[in-house]
Amino acid sequence: MTYVDELANEYKDIMSKYLFDQKQDEALEMCHTFSDKVIQIDTSPEEIVTLHMDLLDDLRVTDGDKIRQSLHIVQEVLIAFGFTYRDYKAMLAKIEVHDKELDVASSLQETMLKTTIPVLDGLEIGAISVPASKVSGDYFNIINHRNNLLSFGVADVIGKGIPAAIAMSMIKFSMDFQGATKNPSEGLKSLNRVVERNVNQNMFITMFYGLYNIETDTLHFSSAGHEPGLIYRNDTNEFEEIDAKGIVLGVTDSAEYEQRQVKLHKDDMLIVCTDGVTELRKHDDTFIDLDDIKDMIVDTKEHHPQDIVQYVYESLTRMQHTQKKDDLTLFILKNTGE
Amino acid sequence: MNINISAEEKSEEYVITMNGELDVYTAPELQKVLDPIRQDGTHHVRIDVTDVSYMDSTGLGIFVGTLKDLNQHDKELRVTGASNRILRLFEITGLRDLMHINESSEVE
């Protein structure tokens, strides 16, 4: 006997008790557990009515009074459906509010937080940032200081929605205001103090902060617990990992950030990404191999960095587990000058 | 993917054991278990991640929040059984220096 048959029998039992055995109270009590069970298996109210009509035939109930009495049972069973429907409506209302919040956060990201990639002599930049859902936790910002100095940041905000968008505005405005007057280490230090005071307990930010001097081809960088960057050396065709010590933003107010520097020679590239790239899950649930990403970059190294990031992104999208997506950001800076 | 979480009170510390993947989908379950312990602040917390096959940054966020709450009560957060992959996550983020990760000494 299937579960549905069992439930039909249970209903028949309730009907018999109510109509023929004079056990109305017991029958009405049984209606409550019965409705819980049918709601659990997503039965619709019309299916209950159909079952009721079938049982009236089955039990040969033809008397008008009896039929009227039997309607009390349907009524009792459908009360629970009414509660469920009201819960459902309340949930829909909540989702609508939540969706509106996400829309605000999303449009904030698309307007205020949008970065334009500068066009410069001797330096080419490519960047792509694709959210897994409506609102991204990833963020990048590039500022051209017009005195051969360029600062940039790649960040991953852990925690979503409006708090994440607010955290990103903190990053943007503090970078905009500090400009080139502050080194990456000082920039992260003051940013950490702002973030630490403001974010939710579980929230934190990882960030790679760079200041590039186009005249000296030197990158000064600091990291707040971000994935190490990569330098592609064109003359040896090899990658170097670059990292600087520093804790994620928003955890402790007394954090210090190491600052390091590295020179880029002609056609060398700096690659910075978020963990959506390095921790990408493939269709078979295994992780992406960093060497695969390096190969993609080497294969397209003659192209403009914007084409490289686009190519890598498209290749990664094809490999990616559709249910386990994360925000994905890739930033490449190429020294094209002598 | 599911996660099984259990919490056991051992004199001065709560020991949390988990089995499964700790990510954006399962992190709220760990949060639910830790919330009352974090608010009370009467115990140290040890989270055993021996049977955690994968952890993402949202999972790490729970550790960060727990650490901040516990520190306000002068309590410690320890993490044991971290695999190399999970250890790398704590190392890159610099959190290894703030939390006691894979240290053998017991707080009894």
Image (spheres, coloured by chain):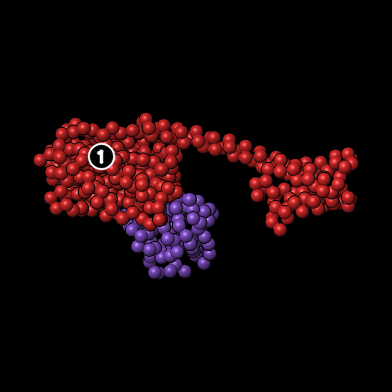
Chain colours: A red, B purple
Which quadrant holds residue B63? Answer: bottom left
Left/right of residue A338 with respect to residue A189 in the rendered view: left
Identify which residue, A75 or A259, lies in the foreground: A75
Left/right of residue A92 with respect to residue B97 in the rendered view: right
Residue A252 appears in the rendering = no
Number of marks in the image?
A: 1
Residue B82 appears in the rendering = yes
Q: In this view, does A21 lie above or below A329?
A: below
**SS label for mark 1:** helix
Q: In this view, does A38 lie above or below B12?
A: above
Identify which residue, A145 or A285, lies in the foreground: A285
Q: Which residue lies furthest to the top in this view?
A: A111
Label 1 neighbour load within 10 Å: few <14, some 14-19, many 20+? some
Residue plotted at (53% across, 62% down)? B6
For the N terminus of chain A, which image quadrant?
Answer: bottom right
Question: In the rendering, at what x and y percent does residue A272 appear?
Answer: 27, 46
- Read off the chain for label 1: A
Question: In the rendering, at what x and y percent does residue A312 appear?
Answer: 29, 45
Residue plotted at (67% across, 46% down)? A43
Identify which residue, A80 or A251, lies in the foreground: A80
For the C terminus of chain A, which image quadrant?
Answer: top left
Residue plotted at (18% across, 53% down)? A238
Which quadrant holds residue A93? Answer: top right
- The residue that mark 1 highlights is A307
As shown in the figure, which amino acid type bears the numbered disc 1? Answer: Asp
Left/right of residue A118 with respect to residue A106 in the rendered view: left
Identify which residue, A93 or A21, lies in the foreground: A21
Question: In the rendering, at what x and y percent does residue A16 appear?
Answer: 84, 51
Question: In the rendering, at what x and y percent does residue A12 appear?
Answer: 80, 51
